[in-house]
Image: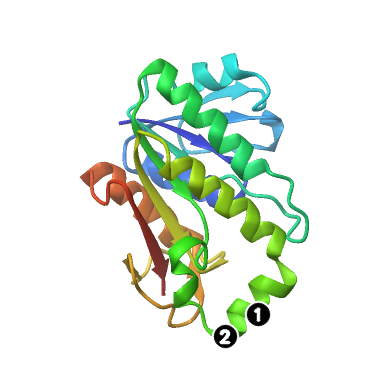
Amino acid sequence: MKITIFGATGKTGNELIKQALDHGHEVTVMVRDPKRLPKFSKDITVFSGDFNNIDIVRSSVEGQDAVICTLGTKDLYKNSGLRTLGTRAIIDAMRVVGVTRLVVMSAMGVGESWKSLSLFNKALFALLMPATRQDHEGQELAVKSSSLDWTIIRPSGLTDSPNVSAYEFGTDIRGKTSTVSRANVADLMLKVIESKIHLQEAITITN
């Protein structure tokens, strides 16, 4: 498959590229600074630009079989709007060029998954990270209101374990440990596009 990945310079994006190449997929990315990309086992196609340049966004998704968005920001306490604005630009570009399959990484506790959080994690989100949740909510609204074949992936707290291990996922599950590895998230993202499952569903993943 031909897959475009946004958020490719982040830790989850890096892991996703590695696994996609291991699965034999052709990978395209759009990044602001190509120098931030590490070396991978195979060549990838790189577009340099940001979401203000809609022509670059369109070029990066044109002719692809699927698009995966792992946009994020290191600032947990300020709503930059990156996830929402970037995802809207991706959706608009996909509509123009006729690509329909979209997988987006959100977070456990967003949308209807709020009820699955423990009281501690609800307090954490509400008191310490309201801006992050607001951006995720805007992102999910853009995805759900699109006419695309979307899937939203909501991981619990992300860890950097490099190994794919046993994990649980579904539309109405609670986190056992409130964490999940980025490797597992990448594995699930590829699984849903390769198997064409969970169309127009938001699913939580956790260990």
Name the quadrant of the N terminus: top left
Looking at the rendered structure, the secondary structure element under dot 2 is: helix
Q: Which mark is residue 119?
A: 2
* Count of numbered badges drawn on the protein: 2
Check disc 1 and give the amino acid type: Ala
Cβ–Cβ below 8 Å for labels 1 and 2? Answer: yes
Task: Return the residue found at the far bottom.
Answer: 119
Q: Residues within 10 Å of mark 1 (few under 14, many from 20)?
A: few
Return the x and y of residue 117 as percentages of the image width and height: 50, 78
Looking at the rendered structure, the secondary structure element under dot 1 is helix
Closer to the camera in the image, 177 or 145: 145
84 vs 122: above or below: above
Tell me where residue 90 appears, x and y as whole percent: 51, 30
Label 1 belongs to which residue?
123
- Residue at 43% from the left image edge and 25% from the top image edge: 94
Q: Quadrant of residue 23?
A: top left
Residue 120 or 12: which is nearer the viewer? 120
Cα separation between marks 1 and 2: 6 Å
Kind of residue at badge 2: Leu
The reply to whether residue 44 is visible in this rendering is no
Residue at horizontal 46%, vertical 75%? 115
Q: Is residue 38 above or below residue 63?
A: below
